[in-house]
DNA sequence: ACCTTTAAGTTAATGTCATTTGGTTTTCGA
DNA sequence: TCGAAAACCAAATGACATTAACTTAAAGGT
């Protein structure tokens, strides 16, 4: 049993990522070992090195797959939300937070990945997380075309919105949001999203850093 | 050389935390080994087990020390900012973000700590991160007493503000904030903070989840 | 002053990983 | 059909974290 026959060939890269995604439902990323992944795939740990440079590279593939899944979920939610720009932005935002809460291990990996290995040629790997920002920016711009919210720099507004969503998702995943005495976590999330969706871009264009004001 | 003389006694717990804090300036938390900490302290790795239950416990001590440092920095900044509630809230916010940018390894440990070990008796350890929320809430309430911003639930506003700060800090530490074409990162941070400080609490009290609106 | 116990280390295992090395067999292009 | 390349595996290496089994100093009683 050295090299397997064609008929029993395994798609190791695909299965390894799938296995790791599955393991992340029950284990933290730091506890997912190549031994565990290999067992789930049906091979030996060194076999993974034929498809991934090292453990960090495998986790980065999972990290990228996580962003792809998030993006898909957001696009589906926006499609479901119909054509009203505000509804679509709201759907994308709520989906973001739901994704994080439903996939805490994956979400943590997505935002605390192992150090990027120098891909040995690729100078500046484009971060797949960028698309998480892009989808928000697009939804914001669509809203501005519809007049809501008016007068804000889309880049700044998108980063601010993403910061809020990521921060809240992070705190939720880490269980650091104290239980509100008078409202459920879902209500809190919904209200924060509504607040931001209606107001985050509504900054007066002339707003300046405090130091430069009178 | 089994047990050291009194005159050459080391304060191992203190020095271990200090050493780990120092190592975090150059290494990620996952790369900080007990061997490295022990060397910096001046002892052997097993000696650390006399003072910490395990590696995770040591990292948790560092995590707690990180929040203590952050809190100190925020209180100092607020003291410097004088008595105007808005200036104080702004100072606390900007200090939060500066702390994260200046201590990326520590900040990541603070928000992606190893799993809490059941402290074998302590039922619910109070999270020192709670104080990061409390200081913001206090500053918000002080602002409300001064009339700015009006009419918001302080708990919800504080969580929203913390989410934004933590999210932005996180994205900055992970280098996931794209360089804005027309403004520096510092300017972006300042504008986002100003935006939120002036408006985060300004939600109309009657704001409801979209599902319950007409 | 002795003797016992406890404290605070040390060195020597153990076991788990990640990763490398050195085959072995199958595929595939020429 | 032959030789190189591909895809595995089993065994070896080296870091660690963690535990076990001593060793000596401090403390406290007698």
Image: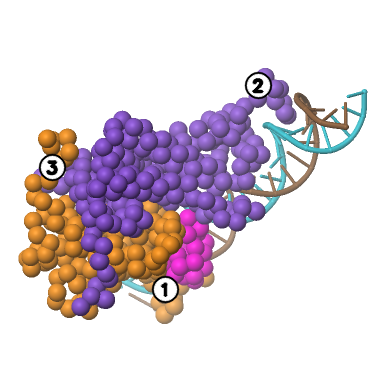
Chain colours: A purple, B orange, C brown, D cyan
Disc 2, SS: helix
Please provide percent x and percent y for residue A127.
49, 50
At a point 15% along the width and 63% down the height, the residue shown is: B140
x then y, percent, for residue B18:
40, 70
Report which quarter residue A204 is drawn in: bottom left
Query: Which-is-in-front pick, marks 1 and 3?
Result: 3
> In the image, which is nearer the foreground, mark 3 or mark 2?
3
Magenta span covers which residues? B19-48
Q: In this view, does C4 lie above or below A52?
A: below
Instruction: Report the magenta stretch's main SS.
Output: helix
Q: Is residue B44 magenta?
A: yes
In the picture of the structure, the residue carrying the numbered disc 3 is: B208
Residue B97 spot, x, y in % from top left: 33, 65
Circle nearer the N terminus (1, 3): 1
Q: Can you identify the residue that label 1 sits on? A: B10
Within the magenta stretch, is there residue B97?
Answer: no
Q: On the picture, is B145 further left or further right than A85?
A: left
Q: Is residue B210 left or right of residue C12?
A: left
Question: Mark 3 near mark 2, Cβ–Cβ under 8 Å?
Answer: no
Whether residues under marks 1 and 2 lie with C-beta atoms below 8 angstroms apart, the answer is no
Query: Which quarter of the picture shows residue B52?
Result: bottom left
Tell me the subunit letter for badge 3.
B
Gap between marks 3 and 2, in whole Å? 57 Å
A163 sits to left or right of B176: left
Local secondary structure at mark 3: loop
Chain under disc 2: A
Residue at x 37% of width, y 61% of height: B107
Tag 2: Cα neighbours inside 10 Å, few (<14), some, or many (≥20)?
Answer: few
Judge by depth and name the residue closer to the eye, B86 or A5: B86
> Do discs 1 and 3 belong to a common subunit?
yes
Q: Which of marks 1 and 2 is in front?
A: 2
Disc 1/disc 3 C-alpha distance (Å): 58 Å
């Amino acid at each position: 049993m050295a090299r397997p026959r064609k008929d029993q060939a395994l798609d190791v890269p695909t299965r390894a990522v799938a296995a790791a995604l599955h393991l992340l439902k029950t284990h933290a990323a730091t506890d997912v070992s190549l031994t565990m992944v290999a067992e789930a795939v049906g091979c030996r740990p060194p076999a993974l090195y034929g498809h991934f440079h090292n453990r960090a590279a495998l986790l980065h593939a999972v990290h990228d797959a996580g962003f792809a899944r998030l993006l898909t979920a957001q696009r589906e939610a926006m499609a479901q939300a119909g054509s009203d720009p505000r509804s679509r932005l709201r759907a994308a935002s709520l989906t973001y937070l739901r994704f994080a809460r439903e996939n805490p291990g994956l979400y943590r990996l997505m935002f605390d990945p192992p150090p990027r290995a120098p891909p040995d040629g690729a100078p500046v790997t484009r971060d797949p997380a960028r698309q998480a920002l892009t989808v928000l920016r697009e939804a914001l711009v669509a809203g501005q075309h519809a007049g809501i919210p008016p007068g804000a720099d889309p880049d700044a507004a998108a980063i601010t919105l993403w910061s809020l969503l990521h921060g809240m998702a992070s705190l939720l995943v880490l269980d650091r949001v104290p239980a509100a005495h008078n409202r459920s976590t879902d209500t809190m999330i919904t209200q924060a999203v509504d607040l931001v969706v209606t107001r985050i871009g509504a900054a007066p264009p002339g707003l300046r850093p405090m130091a430069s004001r009178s």
